[in-house]
Image (cartoon, grey):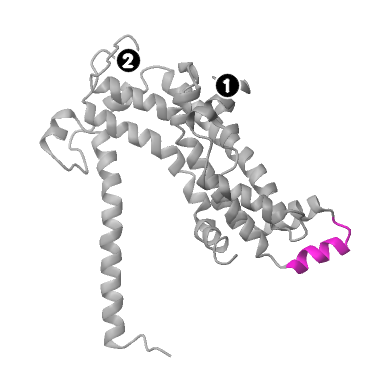
Amino acid sequence: MVDDNTLGSRLFSIINATLLTIIALLTVLPFIHVVGSSFATGAEIAEKRFLLFPTKFTLSAYKYIFSTNTMVKAVSVSIFVTVVGTLWSMFFSVLTAYGLSRKDLVGRRAINFFIVFTMLFSGGLIPTFIVVKQTGLLDSLAALIIPVTINVFNMIILRTFFRNLPDSLEESAKIDGCSDFGILFRIVLPLSLPALATISLFYAVTYWNTYMHAILYLSDAAKWPVQVLLRQIVVLATGMAYDSAEYIDVPPPSQSVKMAVIVVATLPILMVYPFLQKHFAQGALLGSVKE
């Protein structure tokens, strides 16, 4: 047994705690800088190259961003796409992963091969756009969800997690007369909360950060998600394409607007993480330890 009271052990603990504290500060300081700069005036931002806490508090950047209902609509679109898309993707990912985890599935190896094949090779941008157009999804919010229904990497984590569950649970359930769907929804899923929480967070972050698909498939600005609109606001704030008809007459400094944009784009999805934190590390590891 290792003695934790020795000089070497105490010294190691002190050095370890010091290094971890420094790393934690280096990780947190950029976030504090972004938030602080979003509330700072243009003069203070120009004066201080690295600003943590502004001396003069101002909401001009946020007033600029939320000066019209356009931002509220964009946030609503992103929330809708994130919630519906996450539920949609989780439903099909769970069904696919559970089916492929069953050893008695006919053609399981071939199906696994074709699914994993899509991780390496895809149809490409133009063929995908043609498929979206021909299926009538163009210029609809469904175009941001259906084409990316299943992420293969996420599905593989779930499949591996389901494989690691004891076979005796399934056998006992079958003896009690439970159907396959009953086994999935009444036994497998309740035991898989860490993995489900982890994959749900992966999907939620992906849908919240939707940008390229919105640029490609949506021509109606009223359907833009928040990421596309925030990019447009940054462009307007920097003076590259300024249209004062939609925004306040005197825009705040572009740097504070950029920082406020980062806060607005990050905060909502960041607020979800604490609710899933206790499952996150466990779910990511349990689904990838063994095949």
Q: In the rendered view, does 166 fall on the left or right side of 68? A: right
Tell me: residue 97, above or below residue 58: below
Q: Which residue is mark 1?
A: 133
Q: In the rendered view, does 256 fall on the left or right side of 275? A: left
Q: Which residues are magenta?
A: 167-178
- Helix, strand or loop at label 1? It is helix
Quadrant the C terminus occupies: bottom right
Question: Could you say where residue 42 lies in the image, as x and y percent from the top left?
Answer: 17, 28
Question: Could you say where residue 235 lies in the image, as x and y percent from the top left?
Answer: 29, 23
Question: Could you say where residue 45 lies in the image, as x and y percent from the top left?
Answer: 16, 34
Question: Could you say where residue 134 lies in the image, as x and y percent from the top left?
Answer: 61, 21
Q: How dense is the environment of label 1, judged by Cα within 10 Å: few (below 14), some, or many (20 and up)?
A: some
Tell me: residue 226, above or below residue 26: above
Q: Quadrant of residue 105?
A: bottom right
Q: Nearer the viewer, residue 125 or 57?
A: 125
Going by the picture, which residue comes out furthest to the left? 47
Tell me: residue 216, above or below residue 198: above
What residue is shown at x 21% (from left), y 44% (from top)?
Answer: 52
CA–CA distance in space, label 2 to label 1: 33 Å
> Which amino acid does the dot numbered 2 rest on?
Tyr
Going by the picture, which residue comes out furthest to the top? 245
Q: Are marks 2 and 1 in contact (CB under 8 Å)?
A: no
Residue 189 visible in this rendered orientation of the protein: no
Q: In the rendered view, does 68 fall on the left or right side of 172? A: left
Q: Quadrant of residue 147?
A: top right
Q: Nearer the viewer, mark 2 or mark 1?
A: 1
Magenta stretch: dominant secondary structure:
helix
Residue 27 visible in this rendered orientation of the protein: yes
Q: Earlier in the sequence, mark 2 or mark 1?
A: 1
What residue is shown at x 35% (from left), y 36% (from top)?
Answer: 263
Q: Which residue is mark 2?
A: 247
